Amino acid sequence: MAARALKPGVFAVGVQDWDRPLFDALIPLPDGTSYNAYVVKGQNKVALLDTAEPEFFDELCANLAAAGVDKLDYIIAHHAEQDHSGGLPAMLSRFPGAKVVANQKCIDLLKSHLHLPAESFFVVNDRDTLDLGGKTLQFMFAPWVHWPETMFSHLIEDKILFTCDFLGSHWATSDLFSDDEQQLYAAAKRYYAEIMAPFRSRLGAYIEKIEALGVDMIAPSHGPVHRRPAFILDAHKDWIADKPKNLAVVAYVSMHGSTRVLVDRLVDQLTSRDVSVIRINLASMDLGHLAMALVDAATLVIGTSTVLTGPHPAAVYAAYLANILRPKARFATVIGSFGWGGKTVETIKGLLGNLKAEFLPPVEIKGLPTPQDLAAIDALAATIQTKHAGL
Ligand code: FEO
């Protein structure tokens, strides 16, 4: 993919990774991803904003050439994670006169991860500016979106904000801009859920700062560029809101069908009580579906069979993931069936310590559900309905 202009003298030179199946050896990428990099050409200096995974170095260089870049003065490193920084060593070899512009935290991380020498760097502080000649970059530190060193760059004259991972999406596309907002919404929500949700409490302040800038474009490091910033900012405001929706996530795994009977009953009961339900079979789970469901849910129900003396490993995995994503759910519980005993409920409950959630009475039964067991599920559904009504 060649270089494309965002505005005069500002080019997108990043690459699309159409076929990558997983990010961090964890997160499914049903739509691939991109490693966005941008060039800003001033009258005096030229800056490259971020690089890409090292395997895309040749393509990145071809895009730089297509943008008419034959020298680089600066390489802005917004973030030290290697999907953006991994190309730095080769880029410095290609353009030995260039300096890596980063904050001190990022420099420390780049030294650790890439073993770059100290003389490679030009350190900047929050709100520092870099004058390229008619184009000025102002750096805005943005710690914990999603690493401690992350920062944004504001290209003042062109009203473009480069937000690195924040406001991005794992979405490989030939489109430069995110004008298909329906598709953007789904991709960006999945990305937010998997990557940014654990830092939800910090994001509102960044959104306010970005809105105050009044930029024309937001250019993240994954996915297309936003030329209607309000859409992506408003979506994030909804996702980070403290109040959850009238939604229960029922994530379950059933070995021989008994737990499934409980899940069927609970889903029916919640539905008849006007509680929305997202039902996820953990035996074939896409982590992204669970993460997205947890963005809005008021209640998380883990349904699990008991394997030997504890929960099914698929339920353990889901509970662990839910816990590290720190969702806004206010209520949680466990339902499931065992054969001869075990500590299933205690184990799952212990895995959900990060949730600021009230633990509702679990329904743990022996074997195939009896009418009394199903009545306990009905009571749980009624409790969830009541709790949601009080949100
Ligand atoms: Fe896209 Fe945190 O790297």
Image: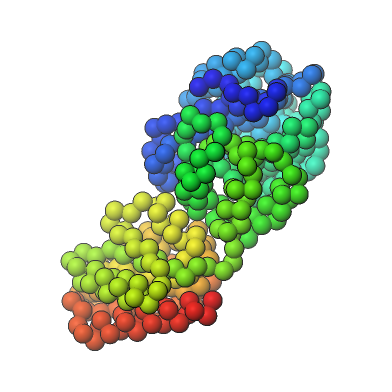
Please say which color scheme the image uses.
rainbow
* Residue shown at 38% from the left, 77% from the top: 273
Q: Find residue 70 and report its horizontal and vertical position in percent.
A: 66, 12
- The residue nearer to you, when weighing 194 against 276, is 276
Location of residue 71 with respect to 266 vertically, above or below: above
Q: Find residue 382 and report its horizontal and vertical position in percent.
A: 38, 82
Does residue 79 appear in this view? no
- The residue nearer to you, when weighing 2 against 288, is 2
Quadrant where the image shows the C terminus: bottom right
* Residue shown at 81% from the left, 23% from the top: 133
In-image side of 25 versus 167 (left or right): left
* Residue shown at 49% from the left, 63% from the top: 296
Total number of numbered discs in the rendering:
0
In-image side of 314 versus 64 (left or right): left
In-image side of 237 versus 301 (left or right): right
Does residue 341 appear in this view? yes
* Residue shown at 27% from the left, 74% from the top: 265
Q: Find residue 336 and report its horizontal and vertical position in percent.
A: 28, 73
Q: Find residue 104 and report its horizontal and vertical position in percent.
A: 73, 40
Quarter-of-image position of residue 356: bottom right
Single out the residue that lies furthest toward the bottom.
372
Location of residue 387 with respect to 147 vertically, above or below: below
In-image side of 217 versus 339 (left or right): right
